[in-house]
Image: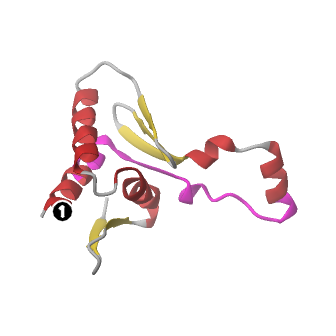
Amino acid sequence: MEYDFIRDKDGAFSVELSMEHLVIGHWLNTELAADSDKILNFIDDIKQFKNSADHEKAYVGQEYTLLLTPEDAEVTANALHMKSDQFNDLLQEEGLHEDDELSRALCGLDDLQFLLQDWLEFIQN
């Protein structure tokens, strides 16, 4: 998984990921941002999850949900969970389609842990 960390001239932090993992970057920028305590908690939760017998664990945020499984981490936009028939009808009427690539992304659990550790190191320096 490729990513770039950015600190703009105003001191704001953001992360950019490849198109395949774009939603993971949005999740990180939106749900955790540069909050060291939240990031540390997620790193600890991932470590504990890897050593547990749990099959999955979900974290529902304001805009995104993170689902951990023993091998993967999936980030999904919460808007996907609120789909309705009316919404689908509107898309069809307008000749549009929903782009799941911009609403969902998957990466390895270890990859997410490494990303969070690198992100934490970046924002603390």
Q: Specify whether residue 110 is in view.
A: no
Residue holding disc 1: 122
Q: Which residues are magenta?
A: 92-114
Nearer-the-camera pick, 82 or 73: 82
Is 79 on the left or on the right of 56, as rendered? Answer: right
Residue pictured at 49% horizontal, 47% vertical: 64
The N terminus lies in which quarter of the figure?
A: bottom left
* Residue at position x 28%, y 49% in the image: 111
Report the amino acid beneath label 1: Phe
Residue ranking furthest to the right: 93
Left or right side of 77 for 16: left
Using the image as rendered, state which of residue 21 and residue 81 is in the foreground.
Answer: 81
* Picture coordinates of residue 78, whole percent (x, y): 57, 45
Quadrant assignment for the C terminus: bottom left
Q: Is residue 54 magenta?
A: no
In which quarter of the view is residue 120 placed? bottom left
Q: Position of residue 46 (x, y in %)?
A: 27, 35
Q: Residues within 10 Å of mark 1 (few under 14, many from 20)?
A: some
Number of dots carrying numbers = 1
Q: Residue at x 44, y 32 (%)?
A: 58
